[in-house]
Amino acid sequence: MLVPDNSSIPKKKRIIVNTATKLFYRFGMKRITVEEICQKAGVSKATFYKYFPNKVELIKYIFKLSSKNLMHKLEELKTCDMPFYKKINSWIEYKVEITSHINAEFVEEFYQASEELADFTKHTTKQNYDQFLSFIVEGQSSGDVRQDLDSKTILALIEYLGNFPKSKQAKALGKSFNELTEEVNKLFYFGILTDKS
């Protein structure tokens, strides 16, 4: 997820983040060095280190920014005037669009990240899940999401499905991360909707 040009983030920092995001998504995180990011971004290493002490902090920044954008999209959907099932469909389309730029190597490395990075992503992801849970509870209140499903069970399943791409079963399917994201999201989200939706 790239930083738009109209962002309040300083231009050179924005260029570093956008360049690194493209490189990480295409080639994975391990292979890409700070030197390569600087070269492709057209900035000096001094400029890179002005904004990020190391590559791990840059990865954290990108993940946090992506999470923030994801939650911003969720808030937009919560407040827009459309049927709940269309909100769910828009959510799925948005997630599929995001994952369309990510290759398998990036996904593999992301799930095998260092303990420091794993702890960081776990904490950030939990915040996202909590916010998403309020969206589901809202759907239950309006009668669009099945009320016979406990919201905590729904949340546990969302977390489980978030880890599905790294499973042996997922790899055995031979599908891209993007295809799996779309199928799993459709199966899950349309499965929790009521007949009303």
Image: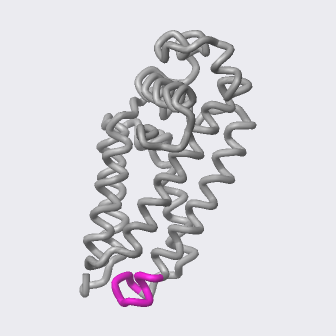
| Span shown in magenta | 138-146
Instruction: Locate the C terminus by quadrant.
Output: bottom left
Front residue of 136 and 167: 136
The reply to whether residue 1 is visible in this rendering is no
List x then y, in percent, for residue 82. 26, 77
Front residue of 99 and 19: 19
Front residue of 62 and 162: 62
List x then y, in percent, for residue 111. 57, 37
Location of residue 196 (image quadrant):
bottom left
List x then y, in percent, for residue 184. 35, 55
Location of residue 71 with respect to 144 vertically, above or below: above
The colour scheme of the drawn protein is: one colour
Location of residue 153 (image quadrant):
bottom right
The reply to whether residue 184 is visible in this rendering is yes
Q: Is residue 139 left or right of residue 97?
A: right
Question: How many numbered marks are there?
Answer: 0
Residue drawn at the location 51% of the way across and 46% of the way down: 66
- Residue 185 magenta: no
Residue drawn at the location 51% of the way across and 68% of the way down: 132
Residue drawn at the location 53% of the way across and 44% of the way down: 8
